[in-house]
Amino acid sequence: MEESIVEVGALLQEDGHCLFRVWAPLVKQAGVLLNSHYHGLVSRRGGYWEVTIPCIRPGDRYQIQLGDGPPLPDPASRWQPDGVHGASAVAGTHYNWTDQAWKGLRMEELIIYELHTGTFTPTGDFAGIIDQLDYLHDLGITAIELMPIAQFPGDRNWGYDGVFPFAAHTAYGGIEGLKDLVNAAHAKGIAVLLDVVYNHFGPEGNHFPQFGPYTTDKYKGVWGPVVNFDDAYSDGVRNFFWQNALMWLNEFHLDGLRLDAVHAIWDHGARHFIDELRIKVEALSQSTGRHKLLIAELDLNHPRYIQSPAIGGYGLSGQWIDEFHHALHSLVTGEVKGYYEDFGQPQHLVKAIRDGYVYTGQYSQHRKKNFGTYPTGTTNDQFVVFAQNHDQIGNRPGGDRLSSLVSYEMQKLVAATVLLSPYTPLLFMGEEYGEKNPFQYFISHTDEHLVEMVRKGRREEFAYFFGDDEVPDPQAEATFLQCKLSRAYTFDERAANLLSFYKYLINMRKFVPSLRSTHREDLQLLDTGHEYIIGFRRQDGFDALLIFLHFSQATSECHFPLPAGARKVLDSSASVWLGPGELPLSEPYPESWTLQPESVVVFEIPKKI
C-alpha cells in the first residue's frame, strides 16, 4: 500500500490560518516561536508535532523550540530571508500562473542546458535567466537544468551544501523569482529541471540532528553522515523528501528533477525510496496531465534505476552517463589519470556510442575489479550524455573548460559527437560558443574552521589527479566572479561561429527523422578501416544518415564506400565553419576518401522505397 504524504513546515491557508508541523520523534516537548510569542505544539502520531494559528501573513518570522533547547529554524522552511542561521519565514503559495496549456516534455524531446544561477548572468539570479530565455530558445534548447538552488550559507555556492531543501535561495530571487522563471520558460516552450540533493546535508546551518535521526551510521558516506532512508525512524525522513520532490513538481510547476548521486542514497528496505518516489511522481503526472521527469545521476553501470518496474527496475525517466564523457574527454585531451585511466582509446568511445555504458562487465583498472552490466530493457533517450558539466569542469584545479584544452576544430567535433549521438544531449552553459572563463568550485561559508577544511580537502582531492597544481581559494569572491560567463559570441568571430555550428547541429537533431529514433537497433557501427575514424549509421524508417567522426590530428583515409546518391549535409572543416576547407569528393564515390583532421562529416542517404 502506498504511503501517504504528511506535510511538514509552515502551511499557510487562504483564510490566514497556518498549520505549523514538524517531525521530531525523540523530543518530549516542542513549540513554535512566532513573532517572539511561544505556542506549544501538540504531539501527533509518527513523531509529528503541530499547531494551527490564525491571522498569519507571509513573511511572519518563526522558529522551532525543542524542549528547553535554543530556538531553531524549521528544517522544512520555505523561506530563509536572513540566511541559514536566521529565523524562518512563513511563505504563501498563491501565484498567477499563465502556463495552463503546458504539458511538459518527454525524454526524447529534451536538449538540456545545465546552468548555475549565480554565474550564468551578471545579476546572478532567476530574473537574469529570464532575460536569456530568448537566447536559449534561439539556440534550440528545450530544457534548462538548474544546479541546486536550496538555501545554502552565504550568497555563492555550487548548491550541494544546501541545508533547507524546501527554500529557494533568497539571493537568487526566492519563491516568486523561481515561479516567474518557470512560468516564463514554459511560455517559450522550454522545460525547467531542478537538481536536488537527497543523499547528504550541507555542513553549515545544518540543524537536522537536533530534530531527529535524519542520518544513520549504518553506512559510511563520502560527503558526511548518510541520510536515513532505511534505519529506525526512517519513515519521517522518507516522507520529508517525498514531500520536497512533489512540492517542486506541483506547486512550482517544475518539469523534472535531476537526483544527485542516487548511488549514495542507501536503502536496503523492501521498497526503495527511489521506487516509491517514482510511484508518487507518476500519480502527480496523471492527476495534473503533465509529464514529470526523474533523472538520476548514477556512478554505477547498472540499468536498474531506469528499467521498467515490470522487470524489477525503479522506472526513472533517465540517468546521466559519465562514461560517455570520460571516453570522449580522454580521447580528445589525452588525459589518462585518475578514473580516466580506464579510457583514452577510440574503442572506448565506440563502445559508449553503441551501448551508453563503456564497462559492461569487463575489468576496470581504476576500480580493480570487473565492473558494470549491459543496459538491457532501456532506450537510448534514457541516457543523458555530455562533453562537459559542472562536475567535470569544476573538479579540475583551475576549473578549465574543454575550450582551453583542445583546438577549435576539436570543439566542433566534440559538439557533433554529443548532439548527433543516439542519446539525450546535455550542454553546460557557455560551451556552445567555447566559453574560456573557468568554472571553479566556490563557497561563502561563515565558519572559518569549515572554510579551511574545504580548502584542505580540495588540495588533497586534486593531488590525486593533477599533482601539485595550484588550487584557487574556493572562499574568495574573486574565484566566483571569474566564473561569470563572458558571452564572447558578442565580440569574437570564432565564438559566434561556434555558436552557429551548435545551432545547426541542434536544428538537425530536432528535425532530421533519423536523429530522433530512440531504438538501439536504429544505430549501426560502420567499418571505416581507420581506428580514429568512428563511423555509424542512424536511421528511422526510410530516413538515414552516415556520420563520420575523425579524431586524428592528421589527414586520414576513410575506407567506407559511400552509396550512390549520398549527399553531404555537414562538414565541420568547411570554410563556412571557419575550418581549413572541405576536401574534394569525386563522383562516382571512390572506395576510400579523405577527411580533414579533427572533423565531422555527415551524409544523407537517398530514401529507398
Image (spheres, rainbow, N blue to C red):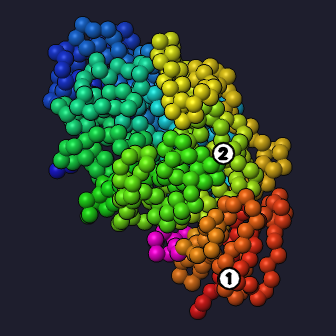
**Is residue 336 among the parts visible in the rendering?**
yes
Dots 2 and 1: beta carbons under 8 Å?
no
* Depth order, front residue of 583/523: 583
Q: Residue at x 46, y 71 (%)?
A: 519
Q: Nearer the viewer, residue 95 or 179?
A: 179
Mark 1 residue crowding within 10 angstroms, few (<14) / some (14–19) / many (20+) = some
Instruction: Name the N-terminal-most of marks 2 and 1.
Output: 2
Classed neighbour count for the residue bearing mark 2: other residues with Cα under 10 Å, few (<14), some (14–19), many (≥20)? many
Can you tell which quarter of the image residue 600 is in? bottom right
Left or right relative to 557: residue 185: left
Considering the numbered disc 2 on the image, is that residue within a helix, a strand or a loop? helix
State the residue at coordinates (66%, 41%): 401
58 over 109 or under it: above or below? above
Cα distance in 3D space between marks 2 and 1: 32 Å
Which residue is tagged 1? 562
Q: For the magenta stretch, what is the residue range? A: 516-524
Label 1 sits on a secondary structure element that is: loop
Identify the residue shown where x is 25% and y is 46%.
272
Above or below, comparing residue 118 to residue 271 in the picture: above
Q: Position of residue 283 (x, y in %)?
A: 31, 53
Position above or below: 443 against 404:
above
**Residue 519, magenta (yes or no):** yes
Q: Amino acid at mark 1?
A: Leu
The x, y position of residue 395, in whole percent, is 55, 35
Residue type of the residue flagged with mark 2: Leu
| Residue under the image location 58 percent in, 23 percent down | 474
Vertical placement of residue 590 versus 139, above or below: below
The front one of 519 and 395 is 395
Rendering quarter of residue 35: top left
Which residue is disc 2 drawn over?
Answer: 402
